[in-house]
Image (spheres, rainbow, N blue to C red):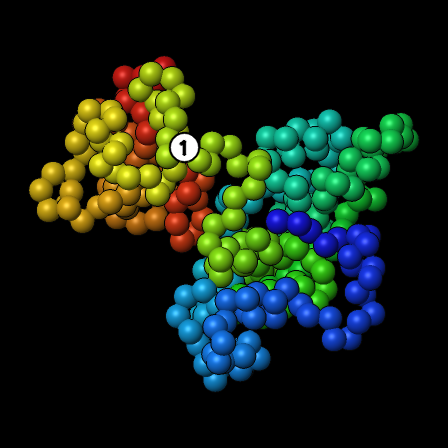
Amino acid sequence: MNEVTDDSPIAARGAHSGDRPTLFKTLTSLFRPAGETPASEIMSGQSLPEGGIGNLLSLRVEDVAVPKADIVAVPHDLGREELVKVFSDSGFSRLPVFKNSLDHPLGMIHLKDLALAYGFNGKSRQFRLKTLIRPLLFAPPSMPIGVLFQKMQNERKHMALVIDEYGGVDGLVTTEDLVEQVVGEIVDEHDAEVDAAWIEERPGVYLCQARASLEDFQDAVGETFLDGEDDEDIDSLAGLVFMACGRVPVRGEVIPLGKGYEVEIVEADPRRIRRLRIRRTDTIT
């Protein structure tokens, strides 16, 4: 998804247009059939379609936020090489910056700012992360995601930290997280192997999309994980995991599946699993 940053030509052209449509209004107009209730009435509570645009009012920030334990953030005094490694390992383009702990956030750093200041142009001046920090937003867990969406668009900020009643950080939300609640999962060129339902990383170890067919996977590995009525009710690998643990698991969690297999949650948010790794236990070294 293309970004409109503070210094982009697109932002400059529309900065003083009082009637410039926001992304929220654009989305609501795109997904509203002719004759349906306008976005302004939806946000005022007069009408609430189910799913899609309706999620902007029915869901709260706490429903879509990345939990605190899964937030990738960096301290304000981190060195350049260490910062580059965090960006590389995480795959994120924005990272929160904190002092002492994440409960004392200072703002966020954008990978583009780091590259322009210390990468592409070859500047060799002393690295100071503090000079690259941009402000971010703060939101309570109970805020409707549509309200946060509009606020992010109005202030042209793409990241918000969720703050609990004691002033501590409870989670993180990006613009992409909110848009996905309307249009579904957004996949970009950095999301590897998105077309394959699963790939065999090595014998007995499979990196899978959570939505992959359970039946097809069982046929591929020659194993049946569910029997009887349960097998008829579960269609995807995500459903298999939910059946095994009885809840939405968190990223990094390892869950036994039986039949000599276990599953590791590779990517997930508070509401769904995205990717997982299934492996035979005899392949673990």
Q: Amino acid at mark 1?
A: Ala
Q: Please state the horizontal and vertical placement of residue 30, each as a whole percent of the image.
A: 55, 66
Residue at the limit of the structure toward the left, as seen here: 228
Q: Is residue 105 visible?
A: no
Left of 180 or right of it: where is 158? right
Residue at the (83%, 70%) spot, across then down: 16
Q: The C terminus is located in which quarter?
A: top left
Question: Disc 1 designates what residue?
Answer: 196
User: Which image quadrant is residue 167 in?
Assistant: bottom right
Left of 114 or right of it: where is 221? left
Residue at the (25%, 34%) spot, across then down: 216
Residue at the limit of the structure toward the front, as seen here: 34
Residue at the (87%, 28%) spot, across then down: 122
Q: Is residue 274 above or below residue 11?
A: above
Q: Residues within 10 Å of mark 1 (few under 14, many from 20)?
A: few
Q: Is residue 236 above or below residue 78?
A: below
Q: Please state the horizontal and vertical placement of residue 38, each as a whole percent of the image.
A: 54, 79
User: Which image quadrant is residue 131 in?
Assistant: top right
User: Which image quadrant is residue 119 in?
Assistant: top right
Q: Is residue 83 above or below residue 96?
A: above
Which SS class for mark 1?
Answer: loop
Q: Please state the horizontal and vertical placement of residue 61, each as a whole percent of the image.
A: 51, 62
